[in-house]
Amino acid sequence: MKTVERKLNRKWLVFVVITLTMLAVSGSIKRGVRAFHAIDPYAFSFMGDFKVYYTAGLVALSETDRNLYTLTSVPNPNSPTGESHLNPQLRPPNPNSTYAHFDQESNSRLQYLYPPLFALIISPITFFGLGKAMLLWHILITTFLAASCFLIAKWLTRNTIVSILLTIGLSGILEFTLPVQDNFLFGNVGTVILLLCSLGIVLHSRFPVAGSFLFAIAAAIKLTPLAVLPLMIVKREWKWVAGFILSSSVLLMISIWQLGLQNHVDFVTKVVPSMSGGSPIEANRSVSTITYLMLEGNLLNDDDIRNSDEELNKTASSTIAKIAAAASFAGLLLFIFIRNRGSNELHIDISAVILWSIVFSPISFRHYYTVAIAPLLIAWLEPRTRSASSFRLSVLSISTFLILSILPSYAAAASPSFYVDFASLVAMPAGAIMCMFYLLTISHSTEKQMDTCTTENSNLMENGV
């Protein structure tokens, strides 16, 4: 049996090395291209997202009205109010708004689109000047990435030394990957969500209420972690559900107390609906963008979104994307319910739901795929992965490459072909779906593999080998 286990471990290690090598090579290519002053079309605003957070923090601490949202409206006779709000993504704030007044300090020129509570959470960083705050934020989000890797590695390997070595190696490799580089470039909140989800998964087995609190904070920063709540209801994890609802209620009350009811009403009734159609630009790697490209034959650029009077949440592609999201989520929960795996495997189901939330969210820019690092690490470090077949390890290796590598985007930039553009756009969502498939089928396949190995080993022993 030990001989069989050594062979399985050796095979797993080979695929780990191959995958990390592919990512390192693709990252070195990007560094080389940048060294020759090639234009990265997505690198247009250093720490642009953080500047938005910083401005929102200033508004949250202001002594004026503290209005966070400034939406553009167009006449709509079919609306009860006589107007509709356009997708605020990439649009500048209203120049006469409170937010625009404070935005003059950070010059983000973009609107704040997150839940109100996050403005309150981030506000302490505004006690530093913008320059020092940007440096501090970069250190924090880099630390959050390394901490997430260590938490998952330590939890699954049970070995501190191995976990430290893995964290050092992974941090070096992940620096070269597309989502992480974009995340650091824009100062996005992706690694914050990654850390909260990773810690929430790790804590769940022993402290489900504490784990639910961390997911509640994540959902108060970005709505997509809310997808874990229906999963927990299906899994009848009532302690987690109760903890999540209680935590979310307390956080909401604190947010309303500090920022007022109107900000929350505006977010729920104006911001969320207006963004539900997505933003069909190259950087948004969501199903909503894919359906738009398939129906329209082309994507929009930033100026198109900024100057358009079209309500993207009411287009045919938006409707199809919403139907696909609802149907796929229902199917995912039904599959998990039928499989009915125990609570000790809940980390696998949560990982699958996290991947689903990234792919089917109307807005999933490339940097938000940083959150997929948690499911990928769980898939690779899960003990049963070492007994997976070569085919399944190939699926996991390819999915990791598609999610993290820069090469598909470079291929699209180098080719005028529609099909290359489409393949590049689909690469990250396809990788996430492949990883979902691997995670959701890990128990059945590895059990069969181990049964086969055990049978082979027994036959060898019976024959005196």
Image (cartoon, rainbow, N blue to C red):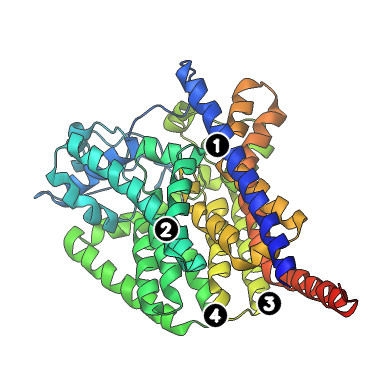
Callout 2 crowding tier (Cα within 10 Å): few <14, some 14–19, many ≥20: many
* Left or right of residue 397: residue 246: left
User: Residue 235: x, y in percent?
Assistant: 55, 79
Q: What separation in Å lies between label 2 and label 3 (alpha carbons)?
A: 30 Å
Q: What separation in Å lies between label 3 and label 4 (alpha carbons)?
A: 12 Å
Amino acid identity at mark 2: Phe
Are discs 3 and 1 less than 8 Å apart at CB?
no
For image coordinates 40% across by 65% down, the residue present is 199
Q: Mark 3 or mark 1: which comes first in sequence? A: 1
Q: Which residue is mark 4?
A: 343
Callout 3 crowding tier (Cα within 10 Å): few <14, some 14–19, many ≥20: few
Q: Mark 1 or mark 4: which comes first in sequence? A: 1
Callout 1 crowding tier (Cα within 10 Å): few <14, some 14–19, many ≥20: some
Q: How many marks?
A: 4
Are discs 1 and 2 less than 8 Å apart at CB?
no
User: Residue 26: x, y in percent?
Assistant: 58, 33
Disc 3 secondary structure class: helix
Q: Which residue is mark 2?
A: 150
Q: Quadrant of residue 29?
A: top right
Amino acid identity at mark 3: Arg
Disc 4 secondary structure class: helix
Q: Which residue is mark 3?
A: 339
Mark closer to the observer (3, 1): 1
Q: Mark 1 or mark 2: which comes first in sequence? A: 1
Q: Which residue is mark 1?
A: 24
Q: Is residue 322 above or below residue 304?
A: below
Q: Quadrant of residue 87?
A: top left
Q: Quadrant of the N terminus?
A: bottom right
